[in-house]
Image (cartoon, rainbow, N blue to C red):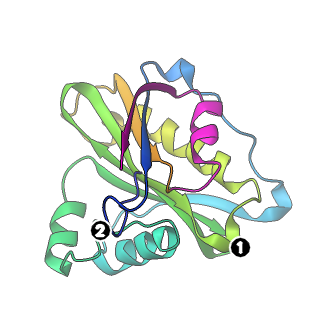
Amino acid sequence: MTATPTEPGTTPVTTWYLEMTAAAELRPAAAPASGAGVSVVRAEIPSAPFSRFLYTAVGGDVSWTDRLEWPPERWAAYLERPGCETWVAYERGTPAGYVELEAQDDGAVEIVYFGLLPDFRGRGIGGHLLSYGAARAWDLAARWPGREPTARVWVHTCSLDGPYALANYERRGFRVTRTTSSH
């Protein structure tokens, strides 16, 4: 996900757009050691407060600001759309991070948000969660009758996101398709 600088024009921002066009391109990361107690679960009941918590807890230190002003009704309307899914990583029962998927036209699925809470970064959970989320993007149509099969999974990240974000996407098999810069 691209972070939004709080004061446009003050920090140069590079944004990378990445994609996969076949499920076979996914290069999954190893799962954390079995003793780590990491699981990934779909939040099947849309919950505006829970999604806002995840958004602020993960994005608070990397300038995620575009949804901060959303009222609860807007969160709810967004989360209740067919093909919108939130997958949450837990470590021993504590939320560690999440990946939000959005089905789009022409078989595209966007990884709209992805990240870990600060206390869980650097522990091997991010690669696993991204692998899991990308795999769920590829099989999303199976959970939403009437959706086209996924033909493309895409994401964008920027220089305000965590320092390992771009490398994690590339290690999972995503290719950069476009780069933009703003000042």
Residue situated in front as seen by the camera: 10 or 140: 10
Q: Residues within 10 Å of mark 1 (few under 14, many from 20)?
A: few
Q: Residue at x 28, y 65 (%)?
A: 66
* Residue 71, disc: none
Vertical position of residue 87 compared to residue 164: above or below: below
Label of residue 46 in the image: 2
Dot 1: element: loop
* Residue 138 makes an appearance in the image: yes
Residue 137 within the segment the image draws in magenta: no
Q: Which residues are magenta?
A: 161-183
Q: Would residue 139 be visible to someone looking at this image?
A: no
Look at the picture and state if 131 lies above or below 129: above
Query: What residue does disc 1 label?
Result: 92
Q: Amino acid at mark 1?
A: Arg
Real-space Cα separation, disc 1 to disc 2, in angstroms: 22 Å
Q: Quadrant of residue 8?
A: bottom left
